Image: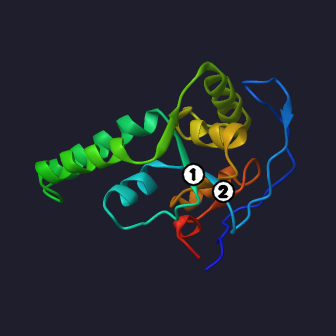
């Protein structure tokens, strides 16, 4: 199955934090390596074993996703949806996944700009969009409203994009 897009790409140039060079986004391709930013819901589904990520894909996420995932799992355990032991096991799985967590000052500045541009009240969701602009090809989210809002800035896709073809 090919990538199911929920947004569109517009040309953009972003200064690479390491070199300062302007980097144009690579076209998202199904074959070969694609770098995805994943949101909290997607990360939780991977940790729960609901989604198996194709070996050729690389995952990145803002560091804030760790706290969001921890809180979501704690809340699920408090509501009785999962046991505390299962919640802790999923936290352990998240920490062992092959996900690169990033949260440097370049990302923070970019997130501020994204939140300002989109008129958002907080920078939480903006960190995902900013990280996609800086480091990835596609932002994977299950949140249709977020995907729609971000679609003018970055390529977005559903979780199906992470699976092997």
Figure quadrant of residue 49: bottom left
Kindly identify which numbered label has been placed on residue 58. 1
Horizontally, residue 116 falls left or right of residue 99, namely: right
Q: Position of residue 45 (x, y in %)?
A: 38, 60
With respect to residue 164, does 128 lie above or below? Answer: above
**Residue drawn at point x = 30 percent, y = 49 percent:** 93
First in residue order: circle 1 vs circle 2: 2
**Residue drawn at point x = 66 percent, y = 37 percent:** 130
Return the residue nearer the eye: 23 or 81. Answer: 23
Cβ–Cβ below 8 Å for labels 1 and 2? yes
At label 2, counting other C-alpha atoms closer than 10 Å, the crowd grade (few under 14, some 14-19, many 20 or more) is many
Report, in whole angstroms, how far the alpha carbon at label 1 lies from the one at label 2.
6 Å
Residue placed under numbered mark 2 in the picture: 34
Q: Residue furthest bottom?
A: 1
Q: Quadrant of the N terminus?
A: bottom right
**Residue drawn at point x = 26 percent, y = 44 percent:** 92
Return the residue nearer the eye: 145 or 136. Answer: 136
Q: How is the image coloured?
A: rainbow
At label 1, counting other C-alpha atoms closer than 10 Å, the crowd grade (few under 14, some 14-19, many 20 or more) is some
Label 2: state its secondary structure.
Answer: loop
Q: Position of residue 157 (x, y in %)?
A: 62, 63
Q: Position of residue 30 (x, y in %)?
A: 69, 68
Return the residue nearer the eye: 30 or 64. Answer: 30
Kindly identify which numbered label has been placed on residue 21. none
Q: Quadrant of the C terminus?
A: bottom right
Q: How many marks?
A: 2
Q: Residue furthest top?
A: 105
Label 1: state its secondary structure.
Answer: strand
């Amino acid at each position: 199955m090919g990538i199911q897009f929920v947004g569109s790409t517009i040309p953009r140039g972003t200064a690479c934090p390491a070199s300062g060079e302007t980097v144009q986004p690579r076209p998202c391709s199904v074959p070969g390596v694609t770098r995805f930013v994943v949101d909290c819901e997607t990360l939780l589904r991977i940790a729960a074993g609901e989604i198996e990520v194709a070996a050729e894909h690389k995952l990145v996420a803002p560091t804030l996703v760790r706290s969001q995932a921890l809180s979501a799992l704690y809340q699920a355990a408090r509501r009785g949806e999962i046991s505390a032991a299962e919640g802790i096991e999923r936290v352990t799985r998240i920490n062992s996944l092959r996900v690169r967590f990033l949260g440097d000052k370049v990302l923070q500045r970019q997130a501020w700009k994204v939140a300002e541009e989109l008129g958002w009240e907080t920078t939480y969701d903006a960190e995902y969009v900013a990280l996609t602009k800086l480091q990835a090809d596609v932002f994977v989210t299950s949140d249709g409203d977020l995907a729609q809002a971000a679609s003018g800035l970055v390529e977005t896709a559903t979780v199906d994009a992470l699976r092997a073809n």
